[in-house]
Each structure stands twice: as C-alpha cells, then as structure tokens.
Amino acid sequence: MVSAGSEAEAVAWIRRQGNLPLRAEPGGMGITRFLLGWLPSGKLRFAGRRHGLRRAEVTHMTRELSVMLAAGQDLDRAMRFLVETAGGSRMRAVLERIRVALRDGRSLHVALASCPDSFPPLYVGLVRAAEAGGSLPATLEHLAGMMERERALVATIQSAMIYPALLSVAAVGSVVLLLTQVLPQFVPLFMENGATLPPSTRLLIGAGHWLGQYGIIMLFGLFLIGMGGRWMLRQPGPRLRADRLWLHLPVIGMLLRETIAARFTRTLGTLLTNGVPLLAALGIVRDVIGNRAVLGAVEQATDTARSGGVLSRSLGASGLFPSRTIHLIRLGEDTAQLGPLALRAAGIHEEQVRLRVQRLVALLVPLITIIMGAMIAGIVSSLMLAMLGLNDLAQH
C-alpha cells in the first residue's frame, strides 16, 4: 500500500524505489490496490492452465501483432484480425477480452495484465515500456524472438535427452525381464538335478524372486520417496542446499550455470534495451532464475546496485556465474552498453549450452550402452556358469 496525494505521486514514488508500476488505482475502504501484476514477481514462463494460452500461441500472437503494427495498421484492427483468425475458442476468448479492454480506453499493457494466465509480468512490463517509448512494434518483435529462442533452447535439450532416456528405460526393462521372467525358467532344472549353483547365480535368482514378490511395493515406495523429496524441495532450506549442490556437480553443474546465465542475460538485455530501468529489470530477472542459490546472488547484486555499487563485482563475488558473463557485464557497465552486451552474452551462452548438451549426449549414450551390456552379460554369464555346472554333474 502506498499513501500519496494522487496517482501520479504514487507512481513517481514507486519509480524512485527502482520498480516499474503497471497501474495505480485509488484505494477503496481505506485500502489501496496498487500494482496490477507487480513486475518483480514475473517469469517469462507461460503456464499451460485451462484458461491461459500456451507458449506457442503467445509467440504466434506476438509475432503477428508486431508485423501488423510495423506495417502501419492500428491496434484495434490488428486485434480484430487476430480474433477472427484465432485457432481455438480459448485463444479467441483471451484475444476478445484484450480487444474489449482496449475499446474501453485501456492501454495494451493493462489489457494484457488482465490475463495473467497467458501474459506474465515480464511480458506486460516490456509492453508497458514500449508504449511509453513509442516502440511497440519493435519491442513485440524482440519479444517474439526472445520466446522463440527460449523455446528452441528448451527443445534442443529435450530432444537431445530423449534417446538416452529411452535407452535407460530399455536397459532397466531388459534387466528386470531377465531376472523375473527368463532366469526363473531355469530354476526348476537346477533344483531337480541338485546342481550347486555359483554365488552369482544364487544372487541373481534371489534378486529375481524378490522383484517378483515385492516389485510393486518397491515402486510404491519409490513413488512415496519421490513425493517426499518433492515436498522437501519446496522448503527454502533444503531447496537452497539442493540447488547449490546441482551447480557444483562435475558435468551437469557447468551446463546448469550456462543455462541460467543465458536466461539471466537474455532477460536483462531485453528489458534494458526496451527502456526498463536497471533496478526494475533486476527485480524481474531474479524470478526467471529458477535456482535459489543464484537467486540469492542476484538479490544481493540488486541491493548493491541500489546502493550505487558495481553490479558485475557483486555477481562475480558469488562465484556462480561463468567468467564470460561477468566480463561482458563489466564491459557493458564501463561503456554504458549493458543491454546490448547482455544480449551478446546471452547468444554466447545459448551456443555453449547447445555444445555442452551435444557433448553430454555423446558421453551418455555409449556409457549407458556399456552399462546395459555389462549387466546383461553378467546375467547371461551367471546363467551359463550354472548350465556348465549342470553339464559337469551330468557327465559324472
């Protein structure tokens, strides 16, 4: 709640604090509802809720709107075209709601903020800054490009991990099938002939029997452990320790750092180049991090910048960002080109993420294949040892 003599005074006070208000409303019953969609809580993440638009739909809408506005079409006609060509009832309803708000005299960013399930505060804040600076078509073009690059990066990681995941499932399934279905078929043969089984064969037979008897209970237990772990990770302390541990893992840790640095610099650079003040931009960026350890470093850097300190020095002291990130941010501060150089850093980090994912997959696939082959070979060799022992018994 902000007490001020007018809406203009309230907005000015919020801006002096380094934040970016979206709308000021006069209070009712002595209570002030001040910002519609406070920017420091926004992520560039488009939730797949029932009434919200999917990320691909928002990207498509943003791209088409930027093209029409750049061609000189007014906003109302552009929105009418989007409503008429909407691909589904959900998208049509959201666009119609925005169009009605525009016809009621509201600005575009206020209309977008009325649909928080579809447009996060980061999106709304960029549109607001673009409306204030008269650069709405260019900003929408940048937004569409930003979302497309983020989708491409996520798709690259997901696509690269599909084959190792399928290979892992196949390996586990093959071992379980051998232990629970194939190996038990030979047990009566061994028992009838009184063969002395090797320790490895007895171990595998026992493991197969245990899986057959308690496999469902084990799966249920793993499910409960997973749910408990998920609950634990929602607590601040365990989540912070887990996030810090992930960042220090040998191979995955560096990949995570590059991914977080790409997201951080891409969002920061986009905000700054579209006229959002540094403190307000940092307030938005801190919520797209997704890692509590890095989030603490960004919050500390924000406090440093608010007190007049050097942003790059505070980020570098955390030791959580790649040195390339710190160097380019420091160069941007020295040359008053922080926004463009942050975007340059984002491009470098995104390329590094792609390369590291390719290397990780190139390492995982043969590693999983070797492990799977060794496990199956161990099972088969144990079975063959028992068969050879049975053959020796028959000869004697």
Image: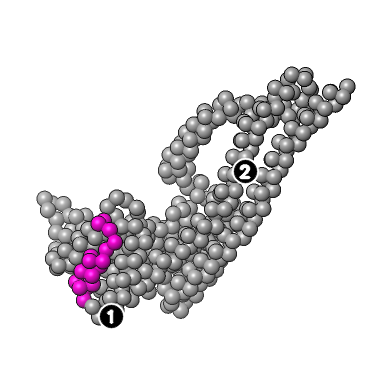
Query: Quarter holding the N terminus?
Result: bottom left
In x, y percent, where is residue 358? 59, 61
Pick the quarter of the image with the C terminus. Answer: top right
Q: Nearer the viewer, mark 1 or mark 2?
A: 2
- Compared across the picture, whether 258 is left or right of 197 comes to left
In depth, the one of 204 and 178 nearer the eye is 178
Q: Residue furthest front?
A: 395
- SS for dot 2: helix
Q: Report if residue 341 is visible in the image.
A: yes
Provide the residue span drawn in magenta: 74-90
Q: Amino acid at mark 2?
A: Ala
Please identify the quarter of the rendering in which residue 124 is found. Answer: bottom left
Residue depicted at 34% across the width and 66% down the height: 60
- Residue 128, image x and y in percent? 27, 68
Q: Amino acid at mark 1?
A: Ala
**Figure check: 119 above or below 327:** above
Q: Can you see residue 117? A: no
